[in-house]
Amino acid sequence: MTLMKKFLGAAAAVALSAGAVVAEPALIFDLGGKFDKSFNEAAYNGAARWAGEHGTSFREIELQSEAQREQALRRFAEAGNNPIVMTGFAFGNVLSEVAPDYPDTKFAIIDMVVDAPNVRSVVFNEHEGSYLVGMMAAMASKTGTVGFIGGMDIPLIRKFACGYVQGVKAVNPDATVIQNMTGTTPAAWNDPVKGSELTKAQISQGADVVYAAAGGTGVGVLQTAADEGILSIGVDSNQNYLHSGKVLTSMMKRVDNAVYEAMKEGDNLDMGIYVMGVANGGIDYALDQHNEALVTGPMKREVDKAKEAISSGALSVHDYMSDNTCPVE
Amino acid sequence: MDKMPQWADVVLIPLISLILAAILSALVILAIGENPIDAFNLMVQGALMRSAGWGYTLYYATNFMFTGLAVAVAFHARMFNIGGEGQAMLGGLGVALACLYIPWPHWSLAIIGATVGAALFGAAWAYIPAILQARRGSHIVITTIMFNFIAAGVLNYLLVNMLRPVGAMDPATAKFPEATHLPTFRDMFSTADNIMFRGAPANVTFFIAIAACVLVWYLIWRTRLGYEIRAFGHSESAAKYAGISPVRITVIAMLISGALAGLMSINTTMGESERLILNSTEGAGFIGIAVALMGRSHPFGVFLAAILFGFLYQGGAELALWTNIPRELIVVIQALVILFTGALDNMVRMPLEKLFLALRRRDA
C-alpha cells in the first residue's frame, strides 16, 4: 500500500515536471542525428542561438526509429510544446496526418511542403547556392574537371547537382563535371568512408575541386580532398573551418536561421510556404578567414555579380525538381 | 533428475537476470549524472500509465511476439533462425503487393490477403536456407544472417527503382488505399467522450499475434508434427530411428518460422505506416531471439517477454523525449537487458543450479 502510494506520488511528480515545460519550443532531428556537422547541426545551432539569446531552453529529440516520428510529434504537441520544428523531408507524410489533430499547435517543417493551416513549410533554393559555388569551382579548377558527390540519390540532391553543373558551365562551357551519389538509402547521409572512396575515384579522373552535398558523408569527402591536396566545397553549414585553407567555400543553407526565426516568432509563427533563396539571404556562399586566401578578387566579383543577378531575377537557375530534368549534364 | 524445480527455471532465472540488468542500467544512468529512479518512473509513466503509452507498448510487443514465436519454433527443431529480420522485410513486400495491387473492398478481407502474402513471402525467404541446411548441411546461422543482407538489398532495389512513386524522395511505396487501413485500438476502444489510445499505432494485428501464440502452442504440444519437431530437436538420430525425415522436419520448421516472422510486417507495414518503408523491421527480428530465449521458447513466455521488450522500447522513447539521456545510452540500457536475459543465461543458471543441488543434498 505504502509502496504503491510512493510510486504514484513519484509518477505525479514526473507528470508535473513534464507539465512545467509548457510553451517551450521543440526541435526534432531526423535519423541522421544531431551532430552531423551539416544539416541537422545547422538546425541545432539555430535553436541553441535562440536559447542563448533569450536565456531559455528548448526540447529536442534524436529519433531512434520510424515509428517515433509520429510519437515525438504527438507527445510534444500534447505536452504543450509550441512551436514544434522538424528537420527533413521524411517528416512530410507523418506531419500531414498529425497537424490537423492539434490545431492550436504550430509546426514548422524544413525541406518539405506540407499543406495545413498550422504548418510553416520552409524550403530552400539550393540550386541557386549550388550555382554560385559551381562558378567558384570552375574558376578555381586548373584541370577543367570538377566533381560532385551527393548523399542519397533523391530529387532534392539532384537539384543541388543540377545547379552546380549550371554554375560550372556558365564559367567554363567545356568543363567536365563528374557526378556520384553515395547511395540510395538514408544510410548514404552518414557514410564518410564511402565519401572518401568516391573522392579518390574522382581525383583519379582529374577532378581538382569536389562539392559534397551529402550530410555526414561530406566529412569524409572534405578530409580526403584535404589529404590529397585538392579543394573541396562544403554544404549546409559553413564547413570552411574543418580544413582551413583547403575548403574553397561552403554552400550555406541557412537552416539555422530558419529554425531561429521559427523559435523567435514562437506563438505568433506565420504559416504558409517560406522560400529561402539568395535574394533573402537564406542561401549564400561562405567567406571567412579560413578561405579568404583561396577566393581571389576576380572570383569574388564574378560570383557577387551572379548573386545580384539571381536576386534581381535577371538570372534564373533551373530547378531540377520543377520538371525532374536538368538542361546540362 | 531435474537439477532444479520448474518454477525456478521459468520465473526465478528471468527475474534475477532482469534485476541484474536493471542494477547495471541504473549505474549507467548514474554515471552520466541522471537519477535512475526518476528515469524508471518516467519509463513506467510513459509506457504503462497512459492508454496511448500502452498503445505503443503493445504495438512493439506485437512485433516481438511474431519474431519471438518464429525463433521459438525453430528452436524446438534445434535450429537457430537469426534471419527473422530478412524474413520480415520480405513479408512486408508481400503485404505491400497484396495491399497495392488487389482492390480490397474492406479491411477484414484485406488483412486475410495481407496475412497470406506476408506468410508466403516470409516462408519463401526461409525456404532457401532451410533446404540448404537439410540437403547440403550449410549452417543455418550463416545462411539466414546472409539472407538478411540479401533481403535488405532486394527491398532497397525494389523500393528505389520500382515501387517508389514518381517524384517522391522517400524510398517507400505509395500509401495503401483507404480500404486496407486497419482499425487501431483508438478506433476499437474509444467512446464518444472518452478517447483512448490516441495516436498510438497498436492495431487489430495484436489479436492476430495472440492467436498465433495459441496456434503455435497447439502445434508444438498437441499435434503429431509438433511432436516430430520436438523429437527432432532433442535428438536427430533418435528421430531418424523413429522414422522422422530430418529433411522434411528441417524444411517445415523453417517454413513455419519464416511465415511467423513475415507476419510481423502486417503490424508495421499495414497497421502503422500504411505503406512499405525501407526500414520497417527496425531490428525486431533480432529482438525476437532475446524474446524467445527469455520466454523459454514457450508461447506464453514469448507473450510475456514481448510485452516486457515493448515496455523497454516505449519507455526508452519516453526517456529520449523528456530527459537529456542521449539515445545511444538508451540503446545501451536496452542492450543490457537483452545481454542478461539472452546471452548471459548461464551466468545466473549455473550458480542457481548449484544452489538447488546443494539444498537437495542437505534434504536427502
Image (spheres, grey):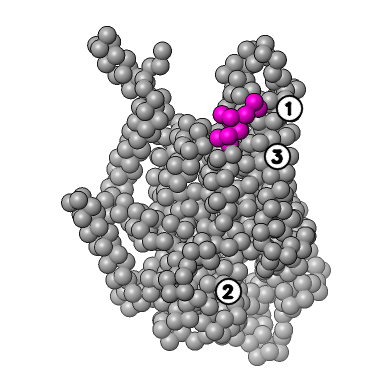
Residue B34 as seen in the image, left or right of residue B209? left
Label 2 neighbourhood size at 10 Å, few (<14), some (14-19), many (20+)? some
Does residue B181 appear in the picture of this structure?
yes
Residue B221 belongs to the span the image colors magenta: yes
Element assignment for label 3: helix
Q: Looking at the rendering, in which quadrant would you find the C terminus of chain B?
A: top left
Q: What residue is shown with label 2?
A: A96
Q: Secondary structure at mark 2?
A: helix
Residue A289 coordinates in the image, percent (x, y): 48, 69
Q: Report how far apart the C-alphas of labels 2 and 3 lie in the structure.
A: 36 Å
Q: For the magenta stretch, what is the residue range? A: B216-225
Please provide percent x and percent y for residue B230: 59, 23
At a point 42% along the width and 59% down the height, the residue shown is B53
The circle drawn on residue A159 is: none
Image vertical order of residue B198 relative to residue B324, above or below: below
Q: CA distance from mark 3 to mark 1?
A: 14 Å
Horizontal placement of B254 versus B17: left or right?
A: right
User: Is residue B86 depicted above or below A250 in this figure?
Assistant: above
Disc number placed over residue B123 in the picture, else none? 3
The subunit letter for the residue under badge 2 reads A
For disc 1, the marked residue is: B132
Residue B86 visible here: no
- Which amino acid, by three-letter code, is at mark 2? Ser
The residue nearer to you, when weighing A232 against A88, is A88
Residue A215, image quadrant: bottom right
